[in-house]
Image (cartoon, grey):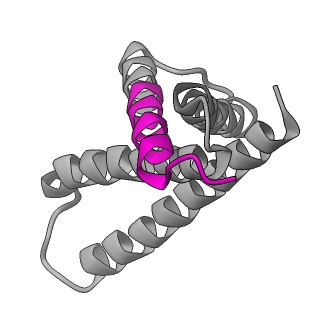
Amino acid sequence: MEKNSFSAILYGVITTFIIVIVSSVVLSLLLRFSNIQESSLTWVVLTLSFLALFIGGFVSGGKGKKKGWLVGGGTGLLFTILVFLVQFLGYQTGFSIEQLLYHLGYIVTAVLGGMIGVNMTGKRA
């Protein structure tokens, strides 16, 4: 893989983590200072997660300028590996089947974001 592609993947993963962290802070403040229950935000969290991976794939595709499926997939895969490492090393548990399916969906979403990101930014050098 080229240096440019790896740099694009890092941009995408950093973008994804920034979106996830900001979303987490906003949702935690919403839960703390309102009467909303955590169980009522399940679909919101899932939607924000997919949106974060799509945007991360989009950014990586835009930065990579070619092979959007590869850099988007790399973004989703690196995100999944980092989350797995935190869960495995920090909590001594692996992915459940449900989490594995979510992360496969995240990778597919990042691939789609990467393909769209390449085509939206054009072939500028």
Of residue 32 and residue 64, the one placed in the foreground of this image is 64
Location of residue 102 in the rendering, given as x and y in whole percent from the top left corner: 37, 27
Q: How many marks?
A: 0
Report which quarter residue 14 is drawn in: bottom right
Q: Quarter of the image containing the N terminus?
A: top right
Q: Residue at x 71, y 40 (%)?
A: 90
Of residue 50 and residue 124, the one placed in the foreground of this image is 124
Report which quarter residue 85 is drawn in: top right
Q: Is residue 95 left or right of residue 37?
A: right
Of residue 95 and residue 32, the one placed in the foreground of this image is 95
Location of residue 84 in the rendering, given as x and y in whole percent from the top left corner: 63, 30
- The stretch of residues the image draws in magenta is 107-125
Magenta segment includes 59: no
Location of residue 18 in the rendering, given as x and y in whole percent from the top left corner: 56, 65
Position of residue 77 relative to residue 124, above or below, is above
Name the residue furthest top. 97
Location of residue 97 in the rendering, given as x and y in whole percent from the top left corner: 40, 13
Q: Residue at x 32, y 70 (%)?
A: 27
